[in-house]
Image (cartoon, grey):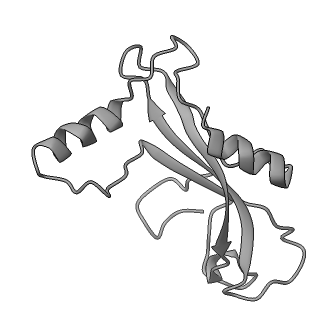
């Protein structure tokens, strides 16, 4: 784990930011998308400042019963996901605290949105 994440954790009492440098299944430090990015950078097809992730998950922490103004910065947690290039296990490689702007989709009377984790069936516009 990175020293930077551990130092921040000690100062703030938070569990983030935190790095997970090895696969929890096999212990490898080889990551699928990091390998592809390195190959692309070495071939000159991607800049050195580019970062990639298999998936980035952001979850806001807010009480939906309380009124919020659109544009308000909401505290959130973020997990950056990649997969092991050796055994294929998908795992979190980094966690951090972020703030995300509240959008109209989250407001009562805002645009129609499916409940978290639910995807409407059928073509667009014909969902629940």
User: Where is 91 relative to 126, above or below?
Assistant: above
User: Where is 35 relative to 55, above or below?
Assistant: above
Check the image and name the residue furthest to the right: 66
- In which quarter of the view is residue 24 placed? top right
Q: Along the line of sight, which residue is nearer the eye, 128 or 51?
A: 51
Picture residue at 73% right of the left edge, 46% below the top:
7
- In which quarter of the view is residue 73 placed? bottom right
Q: Quadrant of the C terminus?
A: bottom right
- In which quarter of the view is residue 53 placed? top left
Picture residue at 75% right of the left edge, 67% below the top:
75
Q: Along the line of sight, which residue is nearer the eye, 74 or 23?
A: 23
Judge left or right: residue 16 versus residue 37.
right
Name the spot of residue 6 as percent of width and height, x first: 71, 41
Judge left or right: residue 79 versus residue 56.
right
Name the spot of residue 27 as percent of width and height, x first: 52, 14
Q: Quadrant of the N terminus?
A: top right
Judge left or right: residue 66 versus residue 48.
right
User: Where is 16 relative to 99, above or below?
Assistant: above
Picture residue at 76% right of the left edge, 89% below the top:
69
Q: Along the line of sight, which residue is nearer the eye, 21 or 32?
A: 21
Name the spot of residue 15 as percent of width and height, x first: 77, 44
User: Can residue 83 be seen by looking at this rendering?
Assistant: yes
Check the image and name the residue furthest to the left: 43
Judge left or right: residue 52 versus residue 113.
left
Q: How many marks?
A: 0
Name the spot of residue 104 as percent of width and height, x first: 63, 83
User: Can residue 117 be seen by looking at this rendering?
Assistant: no
């Amino acid at each position: 784990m990175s020293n930077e994440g551990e130092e921040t954790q000690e100062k703030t009492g938070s569990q983030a930011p935190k790095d997970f440098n090895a696969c929890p299944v096999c212990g490898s430090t080889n990551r699928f998308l990091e390998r592809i990015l390195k190959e692309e950078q070495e071939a000159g097809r991607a800049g050195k400042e580019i970062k990639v992730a298999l998936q980035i998950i952001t979850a806001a922490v807010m009480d939906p019963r309380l009124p919020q103004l659109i544009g308000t910065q909401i505290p959130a947690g973020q997990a950056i996901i990649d997969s092991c290039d050796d055994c294929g296990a998908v795992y979190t490689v980094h966690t951090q605290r972020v703030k995300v702007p509240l959008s109209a989709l989250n407001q009562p009377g805002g645009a129609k949105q499916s409940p978290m984790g639910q995807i409407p069936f059928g073509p667009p516009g014909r969902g629940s």
